[in-house]
Image (cartoon, rainbow, N blue to C red):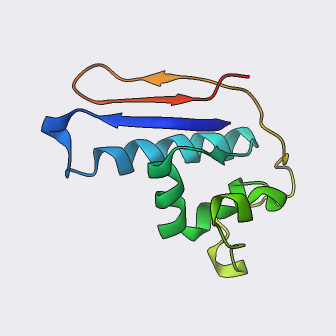
Amino acid sequence: MAFTHTVVEPEFEGRDVGSALTQGALDAVRSEGASVLPFCMFIRSWIQHHPAFADLVPEVRRAQFGLRAPTLPEVGGGTSSRRDTVHQAWTLFLPAPYIACSPRPH
């Protein structure tokens, strides 16, 4: 899953709406057994601050996004079935005034 851009309407900035969407999207990616390419600066920064999600980024691509490998206590679940390939591109649009997050189409 390639995440390219996240938008929060100005009146909702600073209320952790972007963080809630990011965590929900990453949890969904994990449950699908897919991986993440965080081209979106917000998503990338969020993963940097929540290293338990760094395992969703393919190991060979982590340095490209400035991510370190998660340590064992940080890894949030079994990753043995997770594929290190991008599963599918998707777009999630929530009704205004929430967020639109548009991963890169392939």
Q: How many marks?
A: 0
31 or 48: nearer the eye? 48
Residue 66, by quadrant, is bottom right
Please state if 48 lies on the left or on the right of 55 as rendered.
left
Residue at figure coordinates x 48%, y 43% from the top left: 24
Location of the N terminus by quadrant is top right
Please state if 44 lies on the left or on the right of 98 as rendered.
right
Residue 21, by quadrant, is top left
Question: From where the camera sits, is residue 77 visible?
Answer: no
Q: Does residue 57 sit above or below 74 in this rendering?
A: above
Q: Does residue 35 sit above or below 65 in this rendering?
A: above
Residue at figure coordinates x 35%, y 34% from the top left: 7
Q: Residue 47: percent from the left, percent from the top?
A: 54, 60
Q: Residue 75: percent from the left, percent from the top?
A: 67, 69
Location of the C terminus by quadrant is top right
Question: From where the camera sits, is residue 18 visible?
Answer: yes
Q: Residue 27: percent from the left, percent from the top?
A: 57, 47
Q: Residue furthest left?
A: 11
Q: Does residue 61 sit above or below 52 in this rendering?
A: above
Residue at figure coordinates x 21%, y 26% from the top left: 97
Q: Residue 40: percent from the left, percent from the top?
A: 52, 44
Q: Residue furthest front?
A: 64
Please state if 88 lies on the left or on the right of 104 as rendered.
right
